[in-house]
DNA sequence: CCGGCAAGTTAATGGTCGCTAACACCATCC
DNA sequence: GGATGGTGTTAGCGACCATTAACTTGCCGG
């Protein structure tokens, strides 16, 4: 009765978190299975009791990140009805920004892995991640095209990628400002930068 | 007389360019010496005729990038005299932006390597690159502190990193827009985003 | 009590990789 | 024209690494 609950799930989650942290710090090829094992107090091949291989780890990490971002975006955009055409889109953009910023500030390591390690994924899953990323970008483009209807889609997409670069700077500027100061700064900078699309 | 000129220098430069491209595409640990060799039509250990090892390649690439950026920044900031206090700083920021954007658009692979591979460098050189990067950031902060004197330095530094993220999005949004359209877009977005520091 | 399963362990295997060794070619200089 | 040095080549060595095999241990249902 006092026995350890959910024995497998905890280890799985532990391993995933440790692997993400290590991948963020040293890159996929710079981390060995042994490294990941000893990071959770277990040595080497014990990982294979929970995952089919090293690539499976990366796949699960990246799929989880992409799904969380995409789902968050979809939730916020599909949600309410339209008070006034422009005001709704403005609120949706605000929500997208807030969601992305919160995620980036809370999980700088995940953002780093998401940015860097796509090409090290096995093929079937890579396509899925790319699809999710594309859908997420399209959420942004849809909202932005409502705010800036005169702007061609290619320009909206380029601006979206630029804003992602801005928001994802969190792993690089770690420690410069506390998160409570960083969040509104990034929000303000993003909104202002997008206003040149008008 | 029709013999190949500057035999060593060309090979060296060729190898550096190929290595940078490969490092950008697959990451330092994802590229083998054999890969680099065959990318320049030479096989494997021939690289060691020109470089002492794989890490030396990365060192030379990163030092070159950091020095080019820093030198460019220093040149533009130290250059002219001050017409009006604010107008000069405005021009200096414009020059910094133009320089960084031109570099990023012309060399997306180098930007990628510069962003990602610092930790794979051997220690003595890593410190030098970090110093150059810090100096480059300080150029920006100095100019910005003139434009936004009320803004605390930590905030200026965080904003600078964010703008770098925005400008360095070029490798990710490749092909969305032609460079002639991308450059003014990034310039405008950066200027606008920095204006929230006022 | 006991068979089975989940989750570890260490040892071994096969492959890749960085790097060195040993040798070959060819221009140039005395 | 022979020594020299720069630039290649292929073969081999030692290290590391992902993965598998074989074995241990402890919990838990019957």
Image: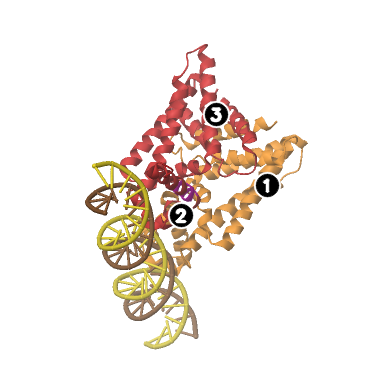
Chain colours: A red, B orange, C brown, D yellow
Residue A103: numbered disc: none
Badge 2 marks a residue whose secondary structure is: loop
Q: Give the alpha-carbon distance from disc 3 to disc 1, as whole Å.
A: 29 Å
The answer to whether residue B68 of the structure is visible from this angle is yes
Residue A98: numbered disc: 3
Q: Is residue B41 above or below residue B21?
A: below
A162 vs B133, left or right, is: left
Q: Nearer the viewer, residue A41 or B123?
A: A41
Label 2: chain letter: A
Label 1: chain letter: B
Marks 3,2: beta carbons within 8 A: no
Marks 2,1: beta carbons within 8 A: no
Residue B138: numbered disc: 1
Q: Nearer the viewer, residue B66 or B158?
A: B158
Q: Is residue A11 above or below residue B128?
A: above
In this view, the mark in front (2 or 1): 2
Chain part drawn in magenta? A19-24
Chain-order first, disc 3 or disc 2: 2
Residue drawn at (49%, 23%), measured in percent from left and top? A144
Residue B126 percent across, percent down from the top left = 57, 58
């Amino acid at each position: 009765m006092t026995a350890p609950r959910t024995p497998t799930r905890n280890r799985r989650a532990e391993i995933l978190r440790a692997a993400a942290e290590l991948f963020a710090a040293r890159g996929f090829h710079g981390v060995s299975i042994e490294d990941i094992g000893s990071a959770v107090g277990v040595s080497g091949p014990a990982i294979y009791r929970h995952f089919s291989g090293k690539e499976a780890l990366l796949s699960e990490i990246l799929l989880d990140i992409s799904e969380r971002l995409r789902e968050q975006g979809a939730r916020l955009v599909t949600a309410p009805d339209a008070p006034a055409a422009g005001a709704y889109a403005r609120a949706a953009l605000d929500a997208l920004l807030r969601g992305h910023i919160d995620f980036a500030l809370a999980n700088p390591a995940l953002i780093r892995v998401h940015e860097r390690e796509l090409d090290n994924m096995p093929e079937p899953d890579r396509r899925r991640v790319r699809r999710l990323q594309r859908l997420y970008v399209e959420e942004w483009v849809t909202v932005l095209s409502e705010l800036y209807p005169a702007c061609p889609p290619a320009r909206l997409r380029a601006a979206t990628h630029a804003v992602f670069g801005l928001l994802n700077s969190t792993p690089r500027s770690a420690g410069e400002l506390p998160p409570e100061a960083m969040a509104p700064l990034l929000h303000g900078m993003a909104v202002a930068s997008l206003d040149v699309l008008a």
